[in-house]
Image: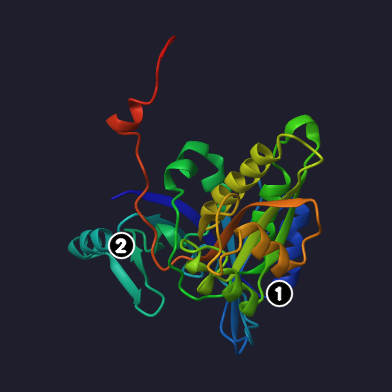
Amino acid sequence: MQARAVHRCIHVLDLEKSLAFYEQALGMKVVRRMGPDDGSWENVFVANDDSGFQVELTWNRGRTEPYVNGGRDTHLAFAVDNMDEARALHERMGCVCFVNERMGIYFIEDPDGCWIEIVPLDRAGNAAQAGADVLAAMRNRRSVRSYAGERIPNEKIERVIEAGLLSAAGRGIRPWELVVVRDRSMLESLASCRTAGAQMLTEADAAIVVVANVAAADTWVEDCSIVMANMHLAADALGLGSCWIQGRGREAADGRSTRDYVVASLDIPDGYEIEAILSLGVCAEHPEPRVVDEMLAAKVHRDSF
């Protein structure tokens, strides 16, 4: 079992005041929010690009008494790669102190009474930390085609887009354009842009279509591929599932080219070609990280082929 520190929880009385403080004092931005529809409580995770850690600000409606941050009103959280293995170990140790079956998490208590939250690695949402180790992010990145049907926070979509916009491009021309699709009917329609291999769009919460002005740069295929790869990595680092749906050189279910199908569906101007579509959704499950095994290592040649 592997465990990675992912956040520290702090209870706050005035959520907006705390958010303003962490942004001004430490440059921390909102990464994700969670809470019930009735607004009785909210958890807001903040982080910055220079730290591999998040702060979880927990607010409860109606609370006026100051919290004891340093006692049970605060806790560390660790993400583990195998919840069953971790739970069995902690049960044997007798340190499990609270279980939330609905959320799929539990807490353990250390010898001094400090609570520690245990969460699944693929739900940690720790973008800053995953991005801090590029090789770890690459190992963990997998094509995910099955989604849980949950709504992706806008903040995460914007971070994936930012990863695409920051991509390198030949001579800095950046011939690509991004079309972000969240409309349910359009996502279901785009699922037919390929004879096979695009059906996950019917379950996805979003898609980003990468197209290019081919007259702008002869490296448009390479440039668009870099954009797709960067967004693919960023999505996984944010705890999202994503899949590269090839568009260039493929056919749609109705006999048209994938390019013509997508261009007509999204009103893309003449002169633009489609490279690929990135599907996005909350993971229903995440495949195990890859490792460089003997087969992959054999792809490397030293000094000559």
Which quadrant of the view contains residue 45? bottom right
How many numbered dots are placed on residues in this image? 2
Badge 2 is on which residue? Answer: 83
> Can residue 58 be seen in the rendering of this structure?
no
Query: Which residue extends farthest front?
Result: 255
> Can residue 229 be seen in the rendering of this structure?
yes
Is residue 90 positioned above or below 217 on the image?
Answer: below
Q: Residue at x 47, y 42 (%)?
A: 138
The x, y position of residue 91, in whole percent, is 21, 65
Query: Which residue extends farthest bottom?
Result: 38
Left or right of 144, for residue 274 = right
Amino acid type, residue under disc 2 in the picture = Met
Badge 1 is on which residue? Answer: 14
Quadrant placement of the C terminus: top left
The x, y position of residue 105, in whole percent, is 38, 70
- Of 208 and 251, the residue lying toward us: 251
Q: Residue at x 74, y 71 (%)?
A: 16
Which quadrant of the view contains residue 218? top right
- Of 128 and 10, the residue lying toward us: 128
